[in-house]
């Protein structure tokens, strides 16, 4: 009987050790896809190749972002993303983290039908 109890405890211990908690990122990836498009103006960019390209690349690398474009001449960013993974505020924070000189304004978000 003692062997059975020890074996039972050992199996339970292995089961609990083998299980891991779901991370926040894993939980987000299981959410349904609800696409949105957010556009906003970015003031303070001085060059198309450096500034605009850097911001566009940072936005495109965010999880859930399908497409990010910067129109340097119009100072306009447009980002298509899964709104269950990111928010417009996340996009703005990403831009603001690229340079203290950037000022974001005229933020408009529209849902995209799946």
Image: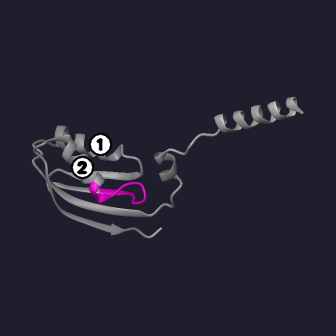
The one nearer the camera, 29 or 36, is 29
Q: Earlier in the sequence, mark 2 or mark 1?
A: 1
Q: Is residue 29 above or below residue 61?
A: below
**Label 1 secondary element:** helix
Q: Is residue 8 magenta?
A: no
Q: Residue 37 at what x, y percent from top left?
A: 33, 62
Q: Quadrant of residue 1?
A: top right
Q: Quadrant of residue 51?
A: top left
Q: Residue 58 at what x, y percent from top left?
A: 29, 42
Q: Is residue 83 magenta?
A: yes
Q: How many marks?
A: 2
Q: Residue 88 at what x, y percent from top left?
A: 29, 59
The residue shown at (86%, 29%) is 3
Q: Is residue 108 above or below residue 92?
A: below
Foreground: disc 2 or disc 1: 2
What residue span does the magenta drawing correspond to? 79-89
Residue annotated with mark 2: 93
The one nearer the camera, 9 or 55, is 9
The residue shown at (38%, 51%) is 65
Q: CA distance from mark 2 to mark 1?
A: 11 Å
Please state if 81 lies on the left or on the right of 20 as rendered. Answer: left
**Label 2 secondary element:** helix
Residue annotated with mark 1: 58
Q: Is residue 81 above or below residue 60?
A: below
Label 1 crowd (10 A; few <14 / some 14-19 / many >=20): some
Q: Residue 63 at what x, y percent from top left?
A: 41, 47
- In the rendered structure, are the residues bearing label 2 and label 1 in contact, judged by CB atoms less than 8 Å apart? no
């Amino acid at each position: 009987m003692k062997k059975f109890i020890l074996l039972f405890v050992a199996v339970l211990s292995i089961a609990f050790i083998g299980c891991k908690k779901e991370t926040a990122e894993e939980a987000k990836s299981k959410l349904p896809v609800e696409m949105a498009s957010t556009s906003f103006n970015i003031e303070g960019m001085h060059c198309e190749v450096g500034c605009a390209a850097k911001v566009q690349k940072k936005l495109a690398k965010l999880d859930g972002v399908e497409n990010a474009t910067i129109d340097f001449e119009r100072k306009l960013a447009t980002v298509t993303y899964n709104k269950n993974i990111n928010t417009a505020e996340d996009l703005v924070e990403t831009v603001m983290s690229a340079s203290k000189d950037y000022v974001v304004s005229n933020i408009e978000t529209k849902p995209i039908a799946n």
